[in-house]
Amino acid sequence: MDSHFILPIILQAVGVGVIIAEFILPSGGLLTLTAIGAFSYSVFYMFTYVSTGAGMYLIAGDVILIPLVIVAGIKLITISPVTLRKSLSRENGVTSQDSALQSLVGKHGKTLTDLRPSGKAGIDGHRFDVVSAGDYIEKDDEIAVSAVSGNRIVVRLVK
């Protein structure tokens, strides 16, 4: 193999590796720019120091092989130890809702701000962001918690 082919091949491999690394490492696009630079310089080198025909073959190969190698690399990343293997589900103990909020259903409190329809309320000596069921509720009115959905506490006016 001619020594002029070694540098472009190395640059092509580095470019593919850097693009695959872009999926793992947050870089704001800097790794992509590095990969584009590696690909561009390898093509420039091939046209300048080898031949125009070899440069055209390199471009044709890049158009076909680089997407295939990147897809294969992404598939290999999914089975590597770098990736997250656990699913974030309730069965694994992951919830987005504070379980203590469910105990608020049926409890009474007082509004600390006007609810138009959202605002603040004091329930059991704690401040909560609450939402009325669509009604306007004035400050210092007595309310009751009617539902809890996720982190959303729905209240109604107690008459």
Image (spheres, rainbow, N blue to C red):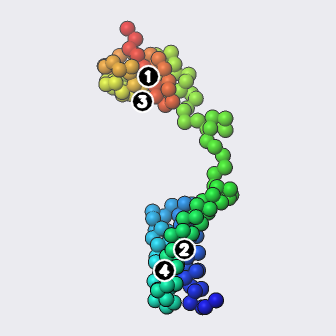
Report which residue position mark 1 lands on: 154
Q: Amino acid at mark 3?
A: Asp
Report which residue position mark 2 lands on: 61
Under circle 3, the secondary element is strand
Q: Residue 102: give x, y in percent of width and height.
A: 55, 24
Disc with the residue nearer the chain's start (4 vs 2) = 4
- Residue 56, label in figure: 4
Q: Dividing the picture into quarters, in which one does residue 33 lie?
A: bottom left
- Mark 4 → mark 3, Cα distance in angstroms: 64 Å
Q: Nearer the viewer, mark 4 or mark 3?
A: 4
- Mark 2 → mark 3, Cα distance in angstroms: 59 Å
Q: Nearer the viewer, mark 1 or mark 2?
A: 2
Residue 84 seen in render? yes
- Asked if residue 60 is positioned above or below residue 100 in the image, the reply reads below
- Mark 1 → mark 2, Cα distance in angstroms: 61 Å
Disc with the residue nearer the chain's start (3 vs 1) = 3
- Asked if residue 125 is positioned above or below residue 40 in the image, the reply reads above
Q: Amino acid at mark 1?
A: Val
Disc with the residue nearer the chain's start (1 vs 4) = 4
- Residue 129, label in figure: 3
Under circle 4, the secondary element is helix
Q: Nearer the viewer, mark 2 or mark 3?
A: 2
Q: Amino acid at mark 4?
A: Met
